[in-house]
Amino acid sequence: MLPTVRLYNTFTRSKAELQPLRDGIVRIYSCGPTVYRFAHVGNLRTFLLADLIRRMRERFDLSVLVVEHDMAFVMGLCDRVYVLDFGRRIAMGAPADVRRNPVVIEAYLGEPEREVFDA
């Protein structure tokens, strides 16, 4: 059983106890970077969420499953990464290893750049 965790609810403007919908499982939705030209709180949500997950994981010795498309977020938070391409696992491992994996690079970034030499 998780200890009591209280978070600030911006809707009610008060701290509220975190109440999982299912015992032992907490889901959080966070919007990513904004399409607006100016900085606002939406820009910070992803960074605040990563910090919250990191602190909760360390303090309560939790395992956390993160499903996310923001690679900077994933690589900065996770110590083990699984990469899917059309529902099929194409890589798994430490973030640094996955980042260099040619299959991942091809699936998500196109073919790796090659040096061109003038003849």
Image: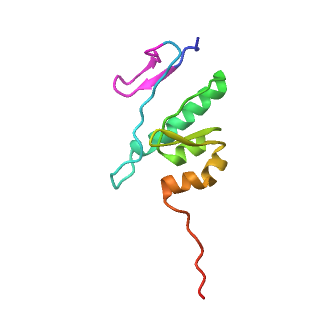
Check if residue 81 falls in the magenta segment: no
Q: Image point 34% across, 56% down: which residue?
A: 37
The quarter of the picture where residue 12 lies is: top left
Q: Position of residue 41 (x, y in %)?
A: 40, 42
Q: Position of residue 17 (x, y in %)?
A: 47, 16
Judge from the rendering whether residue 30 lies leftward or rightward of residue 83; answer left or right.
left
Q: Image point 34% across, 26% down: which residue?
A: 11
Q: Position of residue 118 (x, y in %)?
A: 59, 86
> 69 or 48: nearer the eye?
69
Q: Image point 60% across, 82% down: which residue?
A: 117
The quarter of the picture where residue 28 lies is: top left
Q: Image point 44% across, 42% down: which residue?
A: 86
Judge from the rendering whether residue 29 lies leftward or rightward of residue 4; answer left or right.
left
Residue ranking furthest to the bottom: 119
Judge from the rendering whether residue 101 lies leftward or rightward of residue 30; answer left or right.
right
Q: Position of residue 101 (x, y in %)?
A: 62, 52
> 60 or 63: nearer the eye?
63
Quadrant of the drawing holding the C terminus: bottom right
Image vertical order of residue 110 relative to residue 17, above or below: below
- Please report the bounds of the magenta region as a residue range: 6-22
Quadrant of the drawing holding the N terminus: top right
